[in-house]
Image (tube, rainbow, N blue to C red):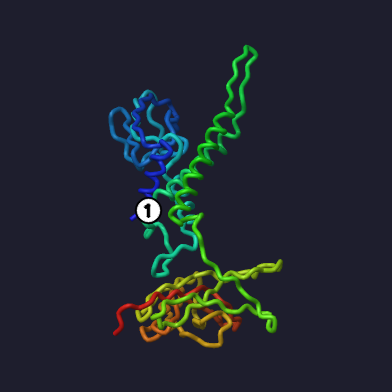
Amino acid sequence: MATITSLVDRVRLELGDTAKTFSWPTTAVDGVNRYQIPWSPVLASTVVVYVDGSLVDEDDYLVEESTGTLIFDSAPTDGDTILVTGSHFRFFTDTELESLVTAAVAEHTYLKTDAFGRQVNITNLPAVEEYPVALWATYKALMVLATDSSFDIDIQTPDGVSIPRSERYGQLYNMAQARKVQYDDLSKALNIGLQKIEVFTFRRISRTTNRYVPVYIPQEVDDRSQPQRAYLPLPTYGAEPVPQSASIYDIVFTQGDAWEVEIDFPMDLTGHTLKAQARLYPESAAVVAEFAVTVISAATGVVKLSLTTDQTVKFPIKSYWDLQVTPPSGKEYTYLTGAVFAKRQITHV
């Protein structure tokens, strides 16, 4: 199973940005509490600091990973010997690479589901797709380095010395494009990621009603469950998007399992009335279920929503819900809204 750490390690291998140890001695200057380590970025979790041979507690200093700056809470005494040991990298901190890997996984697995219809993410990413994801993250990392080097300018001196610093940008850009081609070739060969072949159904608009004809996801011949409707994003046709004032909260449970969740409101709910329902789609006249709303503590705004097993077993694979609040003033408003994803039940009682 892939993890963010394993993918970051693979990207570091592709970039040649593996960790290297360092040991840096220096002498304290009176009143100075900031010291620049000659190597950056550094891995803060590996940094160990000694002052005059005594180990400094890690709570008494701070390490800026990206710049390699060591900051003491209290400046050491003038003339004290400072020894700093740890690990450093060549290009990126772990946090920076994690953000690139997370973006690469999100793009690579966009709209990808497994055999059970579950969204594929880093926790259930197939092993064969780990290397392509690492390649895509490596491409992103090289483009970051290329962007940084694009600000360098060529240097020419009167005595004829020429330093073509712009060549670094060209080398990084060409390497990034080579990794992109490598990723594209693997994606096409394995039919995964951004180059995979997908099947879509063109939507038809009724000439008599000017409404979309519903699209249902095909099911196996022996699957007798309720057909799953495909709710696709609707184009605006140039109109302004509908503003969303309520917070989004999606619910996930298994059909036939009891479900409950506690919600913390940032207000006093004394005298407020709360109501929550789920429907097949927002404008549907049929109510799939009405949530049991229990106010645990009105003063602190703690509320519990729950569904029984008899209720959850009736849910389709996807439906919609919202939570409405009516204050003592009587002006009702929607506080939460979202989708309800009911995974299919295997064991039936």
Mark 1 closeness class: few <14, some 14–19, many ≥20 residues within 10 Å: few
Q: Tell whether 104 sits left or right of 166.
A: left
- Identify the amino acid type marked 1: Val
Q: Residue at x 45, y 32 (%)?
A: 34
Q: Residue at x 65, y 14 (%)?
A: 158
Q: Tell whether 3 sits left or right of 246.
A: left
Indicate the quadrant containing the N terminus: top left, top right, bottom left or bottom right: bottom left
Indicate the quadrant containing the C terminus: top left, top right, bottom left or bottom right: bottom left
Residue 216, image x, y percentages: 52, 77
- Residue 39 placement: quadrant: top left
Taking 214 as reference, is 62 above or below it? above
Taking 201 as reference, is 98 above or below it? above
Residue 330, image x, y percentages: 59, 84
Give the secondary structure at mark 1: helix
Residue 288, image x, y percentages: 47, 85
Tag 1 residue = 128
Q: Residue at x 40, y 53 (%)?
A: 129
**Does residue 33 appear anywhere in the picture?**
no
- Residue sitting at the far right: 238
Q: Tell whether 238 sits left or right of 142.
A: right
Q: Nearer the viewer, residue 178 or 185?
A: 185
**Does residue 203 appear anywhere in the picture?**
yes
Q: Residue at x 37, y 53 (%)?
A: 128
- Residue sitting at the far top: 159
Residue 165, image x, y percentages: 57, 27
- Residue 235 placement: quadrant: bottom right
Taking 191 as reference, is 166 above or below it? above
